[in-house]
Amino acid sequence: MNKKTIILIFTFILLVNVSCTKYSRVQARESIASTALKYKGVPYKYGGTTPKGFDCSGFVQYVYKKSGIMLPRTVSKMEKVLRKTKSPLKGDIVIFHNPLHTGIYLGNNKFIHASSSRGVVIDKLSEQWFKKRLKGIFTYF
C-alpha cells in the first residue's frame, strides 16, 4: 500500500470513530433523561439509592448507573470527577450549594431531582431558590 492509501484509510477510520462517539453520547444523554423521568413521583428517603426512595445524589447515581455510567455516591465526590460546562445539555448534572444538592438537567431550563420535601420532581433553574444556590452545571461527557 502506498502512503496516500494508508492516510485515506486512517482518516476514514478516525471519522467513523468520531461520529460513533458523538452518536453514543447523544444516546447516553437521551437515556439518562428518559430514565430519570421514569422515577418522577418516587418519595424522598435520606440515604436512598433505589426506586423505593432516593436522596438527591442517590437518584443521580442510580440513573447514571442505569445508563452504564458509574458515578461516586456523594455530591462533593461527583463534582470532583465531572467537568463544569457553560453549554449544558440534556443529561448533564446540576449542582447547588448551601445545602449541597444535585439533579439532572432536562433542557429548557428544567431539571429533575429528589427533593427532600416533594420526592422526585421537575423544577426550573430560574426559580429563586435554585437560581440563588446554583454552583454550576457539570458534565460527564
Image (cartoon, rainbow, N blue to C red):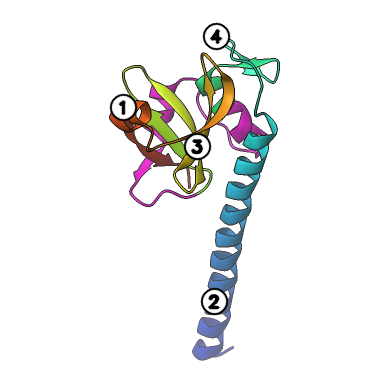
| Mark 1 or 2: the one toward you | 1
Which residue is more in the foreground, 108 or 91? 108
Secondary structure found at label 1: helix
Marks 3 and 2, Cα distance to the nearest angstrom? 41 Å
**Is 67 rendered above or below residue 57?**
below
Q: Assign a secondary structure to mark 4.
A: loop
Question: Residue 100 appears at what percent x and percent y?
Answer: 38, 20
Which residue is tagged 1?
133
- Give the mark nearer the N terminus: 3 vs 2: 2
Residue 82 part of the magenta segment: yes
Instruction: Work out whether residue 81 or residue 91 is closer to the camera in this orientation and state it.
Output: 91
Q: Nearer the viewer, mark 3 or mark 4?
A: 3
Q: CA distance from mark 1 to mark 3?
A: 14 Å
Q: Residue furthest front?
A: 128
Q: Disc 3 residue type?
A: Phe
In front: mark 3 or mark 2? Answer: 3
Q: Report the mark closest to the observer, 4 or 2.
A: 4
Q: Which residue is located at x 59 percent, y 37 percent?
A: 69
Q: CA–CA distance between discs 4 and 2?
A: 52 Å
- The region drawn magenta spans 61-89
Q: Position of residue 110 (x, y in %)?
A: 48, 40
Label 1 vs label 4, nearer the camera = 1
Which mark, residue 46? 4
Mark nearer the N terminus (4 vs 2): 2
Q: Which mark is residue 111?
A: 3
